[in-house]
Image (cartoon, rainbow, N blue to C red):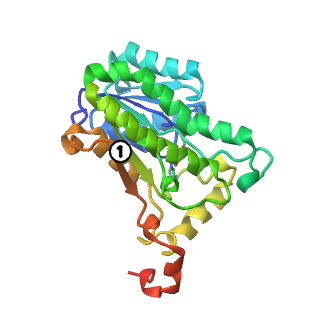
Amino acid sequence: MPGRFSGKVAIITGSSFGIGRETAVLFAKEGAKVTVTGRSEERLQGTKKALLDAKVPESNFIIVPADITTPSGQDNLISNTLERFGKIDILVNNAGASIPDSQKRTGVKQGIETYEKVMRLNVQSVIEMTQKVRPHLAKTKGDIVNVSSIVALKAGWAHAPYYPLAKAALDQYTRSAAIDLIHEGIRVNTVNPGIVETGFHGQATGLSEDASKKFYDDMGSNRNAIPCGFSGRPDHIAKAIAFLADRDTSEYIVGQNIIADGGTSLVLGIHTQFPRQTEKL
Ligand code: NDP
């Protein structure tokens, strides 16, 4: 398909659902060959359907089931991509989650095993994928986009401290990797979403479909939480990822963050005492 990513090959992790699925469809519609991945066969089939519904030819994507936290999953992803498409131009490190504590502990009582799982998924897998894909991106002068979160910014998160810790580490890794890898012609940048309607506050955290919908509706109608007045959609984030993955639109941006949160990170608790900050626009 002709488009700004014509001739490009992209690996998009966590593309069996949510932001990753939307990004895979957007990239493929704009000409990229994409590698779609995640653990759930059923969810991967959902992305396949979304790609076919968008009239993306089957020859332009592959589906590789893989757990991104395992070395074998990472290696399969890369070797299958190279075998099918011959090169890698773009890596989107999107897979991530706030993994609940197995014993339902909260705050500083959450176990070290929860910390390890959260760091392994949100930080270590990104470091490992960056190391493994680097030689291929150096050949193509490629681009990496990491998906972080506004929880990485300067606010405390009492309920589940390890996910914000992991995303803050990811932001700092992005900066360090960016000034290292730019010497090889590889750019690294980050998108930090706010609340986005996906499986994040749903299946990933054990919420039912109804409870998840209510969460996003309540958040979206509360301008103290989201000043723009609605929860984000996956396409809002996919478009920001595409902007950073496209050299034409963002060549001079290196190691930076785009915050896409409808204004959430600009609201302080104290603003609720000053109604004009949060009244309907
Ligand atoms: P979803 O839960 O909808 O999707 C998460 C994706 O990550 C799925 O495709 C899931 O695939 C994949 N994934 C999770 N764990 C693994 C694993 N071990 N191995 C391989 N794939 C895995 O969430 P979002 O789309 O919202 O999340 C995408 C990114 O956006 C994450 O990094 C998240 O932290 C970030 N984010 C999301 C926000 C939101 O409000 N939605 C806010 C801020 C940041 P499968 O289940 O098939 O393994």
Looking at the image, in which quadrant does ligand 1 appear?
Answer: top right
Report the number of numbered marks.
1
Give the quadrant of residue 92: top left
Query: Can you identify the residue that label 1 sits on?
Result: 241
Q: Percent from the top left, x then y, of residue 160?
A: 66, 54
Tell me: 232 left or right of 205. Answer: left
Q: Percent from the top left, x then y, of residue 230?
A: 46, 67
**Quadrant of the image containing the C terminus:** bottom left
Rendered view: 187 above or below 164: above
Give the quadrant of residue 119: top right
Q: Which residue is at the front of the view, 209 or 239?
A: 239
Label 1 secondary element:
helix
Residue 52 in view: no
Asked if disc 1 is less than 8 Å from ligand 1, the answer is no
Residue at (51, 37) in percent of width and height: 14
Residue at (34, 26) in percent of width and height: 60
Q: Which residue is at the front of the view, 100 or 113?
A: 113
Residue sitting at the far right: 103
Q: Percent from the top left, x then y, of residue 101?
A: 73, 46
Q: Amino acid at mark 1?
A: Ile
Rendered view: 196 above or below 182: below
Give the quadrant of residue 236: bottom left
Residue at (42, 44) in percent of width and height: 22
**Quadrant of the image containing the N terminus:** top left
Q: Percent from the top left, x then y, of residue 213?
A: 59, 61
Tell me: 144 left or right of 31. Answer: right
